[in-house]
Image: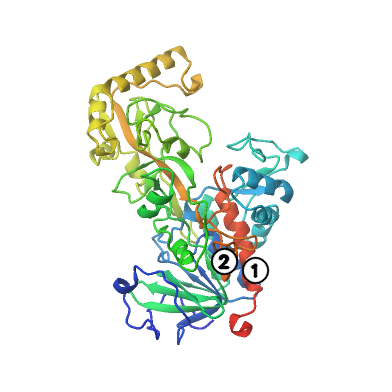
Amino acid sequence: MQGAAVAVAGAAIMGVAGCTADQTAASHTPVGLPDAWDFEADIVVVGYGGAGSIAAITAADNGSSVFLIEKYPNDTETEIRHTPSSRAAGAALLNCWNKEDGAKALRAHSMELTDQEVCDAWAERASKHLDYLRSLGFEYSQPQNPAEGGRESNGEYPMLYGGNSSILANGVIPGNGSGFMQVARKCIADRSDKISVLWETEGRRLIRNEETKEICGVICLTADGKEIAVKAKKAVALTTGGFGQNEDMKKNYLRGYPAHYYACTNSNGDGIKMGQAVGAELVHMTNCQGGGITYHPDWGRGASFSSNNASIYVSKRGNRFFYEMGGPSHGLWFEFCKIDPKTADFPNTPSWRIFGADAKWPLIATREKGFLDGTAQSQDWAPTSEEVVDKELMISKGWVMTADTVEAMAEAILADPENEGKMDVETLKTTIENYNRYVTEGSDPEFGRPEASLAPLNPPYYWMKNYPGGAATQGGLKRNAKGQVVDVFGDPILRLYVAGENGNVWACFYPRAGTNTSDNVAFGWIIGDEMSALEPWEQAE
């Protein structure tokens, strides 16, 4: 590698010399080969999350030099600053017992939106990626195959092929996603002779040889607003995540809006736009994985609800609209995105989750930010764990609203601009009266909540606005079985690869925890192998 470093000052290059952030921020247009390069390696991976980590590690172990381009700053000894979506993930890693059944399960859960060859490629790696991770130093546990006496448990869509652990199952890593990234970061550091990280550096535009149409590198923007050219002698990978923090993309692509996500404040769709600029096809743009999520501008991201039986959800008009305590936890967002053709609106976005005086606090769950390398110290996603247990603080900041009567609660919701003047006081009163009667009778005839989940709503009442969203979006650049980005005609864009949340292979129905991580690992592994096997483009001319 030439110019290997962990931070970049940003030397000017011919063709873009003197450009600043203000002059280039709006452009993702590809550029031709520059007259000079600032850095070069065999492979350039844009995005240092789960997929980017595995791709870089795999490529390095195959003998290739790698530059990881990362928008976040590095951690310090006392502060966690590198927080990709993978660091907020759960402990699970979805795997399949055999590749044939695994491919059928992916195909079924994606409603055949994912090409069969891509399903086959995922399943071939997912049937053995637990062993692969363990070979790298990860401590994933191996679940026991039901065919060999292991316990069989349903996923979130047991009616679909592969919706139980006879086909799909989860390995578990200590420390959740933060534990995964802690080991991944150690693997990267252990390969510092092959892998260098450019921190606080944003991928902006792909560099394309206009004669051969091959992708040859990336124009990046450094923290001080300088552009640099990073040469990829073999290939570029866009493992940049989704678009959960891009309001324009969410508004235009997702089924429901507003939508909010708790992971990765850098998920702005940068890599998606870079791929579009060279003709890439998009896939799964209407999909995310998540349920209902609360949000406040103070936090800068969404926050999950704590598990709490003593609550109901009501629509803009004040009625319950779904079974609150069960169903697909990673797919509940569908319930909030329904359109009412009679009123031409989204009646359930936002909705309001109402808690009674007997609800267990905290009402909001915190998300672990991650372990500092080599320690057990952790930090929380906003709001902090100390704040969410402070009832008076949360009320004073407007994170949780409260009222002593149903009428006062209805009037307060009615005054919220996002309610659009639709809350009906009598409807809300009837909803709560009916629900409390169901609690007394021990039966919920409307939505079938079991008796054990029915807890009364007594004053004072507390409520929070609820939106579709959750962990991450899943749309992005379409790939083939080799992880190559393909154009709108299905042809591969030469030397451009993708993995992870940017065009995740799982579409429509998210089967269980660990599904996104499975794509990070399987296709990170695939593209690491594929990219490192290429001959350098300078020799291929």
What is the quadrant of residue 419 in the picture?
A: top left
Q: Is residue 41 above or below residue 407?
A: below
Residue neighbourhood size for the residue with mark 1, other residues' Cα within 10 Å, grouped as few (<14), some (14–19), many (≥20): many
Q: Label 1 vs label 2: CA separation? A: 9 Å
Compared to 238, does 476 lie above or below?
above
Residue farthest to the right? 148
Q: Amino acid at mark 1?
A: Glu
Asked where in the image residue 25 lies, by quadrant, the reply is bottom left
Residue sitting at x 45%, y 12%: 441
For disc 2, the marked residue is 497
Q: Position of residue 318 (x, y in %)?
A: 33, 26
Q: Quadrant of the C terminus?
A: bottom right
Q: Secondary structure at mark 1?
A: helix
What's the colour scheme? rainbow
For the residue pair 110 and 88, the one nearer the viewer reads as 110
* Residue 185 seen from this side: yes
Q: Quadrant of residue 117?
A: bottom right
Please give the count of numbered marks on the rendered protein. 2
Give the image location of residue 208, x and y in percent: 50, 76
Label 1 with label 2: CB-CB less than 8 Å: yes
Left or right: 487, with 224 as reference point: right
Residue at coordinates 39% horizontally, 60% vertically from top-left?
A: 79
Marks 1 and 2, the one that precedes in the sequence: 2
- Residue marked by disc 1: 530
